[in-house]
Amino acid sequence: MYFYRPSGFVGGAVAYDIKTADNNVITTLHSGGYFPYYSNTGENEFWARTESRSSVTLDVKPGGVYFVKGTVGVGFFVGRPHLIVVPNEIAEKEIVECKLIPLPAKEEGKDSAKEK
């Protein structure tokens, strides 16, 4: 599965965390970035929040490839995230303009959410 956010003028400076249903941070989604993620099969919820929350729920099948697009809408104080599942044929064209979001550097003495 891929989380991605095409570059855009509206909300370009706003970044937000993509989280699992149990609040583990997958990545911080920036304008013009994408992040690959291996999800468990079955029903999975992913969400983001600034001043409002947006979520998507996917029924992940073995070997399936899924694309979740993040955008930012106008908010009162800060841009509001919006997550949508995008058909592969559209997402594959949009994601080529995005750059890979690197894994965050580990802080000494702290484990990442994936290792817990």
Image (tube, rainbow, N blue to C red):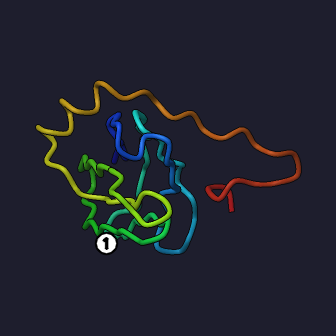
Q: At 37% across and 70% down in the image, what residue appears? A: 45
**Amino acid bearing label 1:** Glu
Q: How crowded is mark 1: few (under 14 residues within 10 Å), some or many (20 or more)?
A: few
Residue lying farthest front? 76
- x and y percentages locating residue 60 in the rendered image: 28, 61
Quarter of the rendering containing residue 114 = bottom right
Q: At 69% across and 63% down in the image, what residue appears? A: 116
Q: Label 1: state its secondary structure.
A: strand
- x and y percentages locating residue 102 in the rendered image: 57, 33
Side of 1 relative to 49 (left or right): left
- x and y percentages locating residue 104 in the rendered image: 66, 41
Image position of 94 with respect to 107: above or below: above
Side of 29 relative to 54 (left or right): right
Image position of 56 with respect to 97: above or below: below
Side of 115 relative to 96 (left or right): right
Side of 35 relative to 56 (left or right): right
Who is closer to the viewer here, 100 or 75? 75
Quarter of the rendering containing residue 47 = bottom left
Who is closer to the viewer here, 54 or 72? 72
Count of all numbered marks drawn on residues in the image? 1
Image position of 75 with respect to 12: above or below: below
- x and y percentages locating residue 111 in the rendered image: 76, 54
Q: At 42% across and 50% down in the image, what residue appears? A: 38
Q: Which residue in the protein does label 1 denote?
A: 43
Q: At 69% across and 53% down in the image, what residue appears? A: 112
